[in-house]
Image (spheres, grey):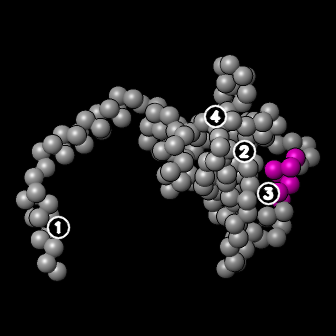
Amino acid sequence: MIEMKVAGIALDAITRSPIVLLKDASDRRALPIYIGQEQARAIMSALENQKPPRPLTHDLIVNILETWNMALERVIIHSLQKDTFYAALIVQQGEVKKEIDARPSDAIAIALRTNTPIWVMEEVVADASIPVDRDADEAEQQAFREFISNLRPEDLIKRFGNGDS
């Protein structure tokens, strides 16, 4: 899994639909997730530390978690099926952990309110992310190609043994 942070909310240039943009720690990969208008507002209010006069839905969920001494341990965006992302809240109360199905937008809105890490399965990042730093990606790929082209079987035997264990 890869830990990602919310980079912000953007609008699709064509459809004008909101997108929450997640980035990895190295700012090399970005994961765009299309969300609804209400979820975009909920995420933006958390990013801007806005406190509504009365609790909105995500604030209410956080209040329930706190009242019942439950902690949101992490959010996991675990799959992508037919252009739909799937997420789970990992909630802990004492020694008991539960996984609760959630839309990624809701999970992100709650994670931002509780300073909870957001993790994305590597397969999802591989399938849906976009490169942010193409030059760094190309440099890394070129370095790997050079490593492979200079690799000799003897190097592997020295490093990993001859297999007679």
Please give the residue where the numbered disc 1 appears in the rendered image: 160
Mark 3 or mark 4: which comes first in sequence? 4
Q: Magenta-highlighted stretch: main secondary structure? A: helix
Residue sitting at x 57%, y 44% = 5
Tell me how far mark 2 sits from mark 3, CA to CA: 15 Å
Residue 133 to residue 52: above or below: above
Question: Mark 3 touching mark 4, by CB under 8 A?
Answer: no
Q: Badge 2: how crowded within 10 Å, few (<14), some, or many (20+)?
A: many
**The disc labelled 4 sits on which kind of residue?**
Gly
Query: Is 164 positioned to the left or the right of 38 in the image?
Result: left
Residue sitting at x 81%, y 50% = 58
Tell me how far mark 2 sits from mark 1, CA to CA: 45 Å
- Percent from the top left, x then y, of residue 148? 19, 46
Q: Is residue 113 visible?
A: no
- Percent from the top left, x then y, of residue 69? 77, 71
Please give the residue where the numbered disc 4 appears in the rendered image: 8
Magenta segment, which residues? 56-63
Numbered tag placed on residue 105 in the rendering: 2
Whether the magenta-drawn stretch holds residue 39 is answered as no
User: Image quarter for residue 163?
Assistant: bottom left
Please give the residue where the numbered disc 3 appears in the rendered image: 62
Mark 2 or mark 4: which comes first in sequence? 4
- Percent from the top left, x then y, of residue 135? 35, 28
Q: Helix, strand, or loop for circle 1?
A: helix
Q: Badge 1: how crowded within 10 Å, few (<14), some, or many (20+)?
A: few
**The disc labelled 2 sits on which kind of residue?**
Ser
User: Image quarter for residue 161?
Assistant: bottom left
